[in-house]
Image: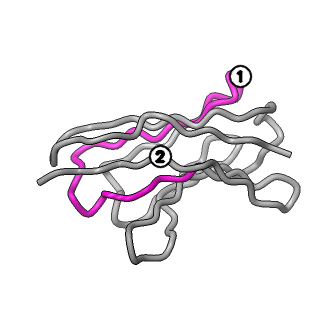
């Protein structure tokens, strides 16, 4: 099993930056893919970005060029650096880890971007 805890959410003005962190309860060396998802009110949860164990990222088109995903395998941490934030980025952001074919989720952290 993997427990995931997100941190770093909050209120930010449009155009600003914020960094989310995801702490895992176990070594993430063996977790091939980790990612960030978000869910806005009334909408389905969507992929924001994911990253492989070797550090290869993949981004949703809506965040390309603005968000950067990274992971520190030695510290069991994953990050999402969000720049040039827009009101439409407002959502609850969830950390995800796919481990042995099972999906594990954090409790989510709210990011609110004011216009």
Secondary structure state at the residue bearing disc 1: loop
Quarter the C terminus occupies: bottom left
Q: Residue at x 21, y 58 (%)?
A: 87
Count the marks: how many?
A: 2
| Camera-side mark, 2 or 1 | 2
Q: Residue at x 88, y 55 (%)?
A: 100
Q: Quadrant of residue 19?
A: top left
Q: Determine whether 66 is above or below 59 in the image.
A: above
Q: Mark 1 = which residue?
A: 74
Give whichever of discs 2 and 1 has the lower sequence position: 1
Q: Residue at x 41, y 49 (%)?
A: 110
Q: Residue at x 64, y 33 (%)?
A: 23
- Residues rendered magenta in the picture: 71-94
Q: Quadrant of residue 86?
A: bottom left
Magenta-span inclusion, residue 74: yes
From the top left corner, tell me how far across and down residue 67 is, in percent. Answer: 37, 47
What crowding class fits label 2: few (fewer than 14 Cα within 10 Å), some (14-19), or many (20 or more)? many
Q: Is 111 left or right of 95, judged from the image as shown?
A: left
Q: Mark 2 = which residue?
A: 109
From the top left corner, tell me how far across and down residue 35 is, in percent. Answer: 59, 52
């Amino acid at each position: 099993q993997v427990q995931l805890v997100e941190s770093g959410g909050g209120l930010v003005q449009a155009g600003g930056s914020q960094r989310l962190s995801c702490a895992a309860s176990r070594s993430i060396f063996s977790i091939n893919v980790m990612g960030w998802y978000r869910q806005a009110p009334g909408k389905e949860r969507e992929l924001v970005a994911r990253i492989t164990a070797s550090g290869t990222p993949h981004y949703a088109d809506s965040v390309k060029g603005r968000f950067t995903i990274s992971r520190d395998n030695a510290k069991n941490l994953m990050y999402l650096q969000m720049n040039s934030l827009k009101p439409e980025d407002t959502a609850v952001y969830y950390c995800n880890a796919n481990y042995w074919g099972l999906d594990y989720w954090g409790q989510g952290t709210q990011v609110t971007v004011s216009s």
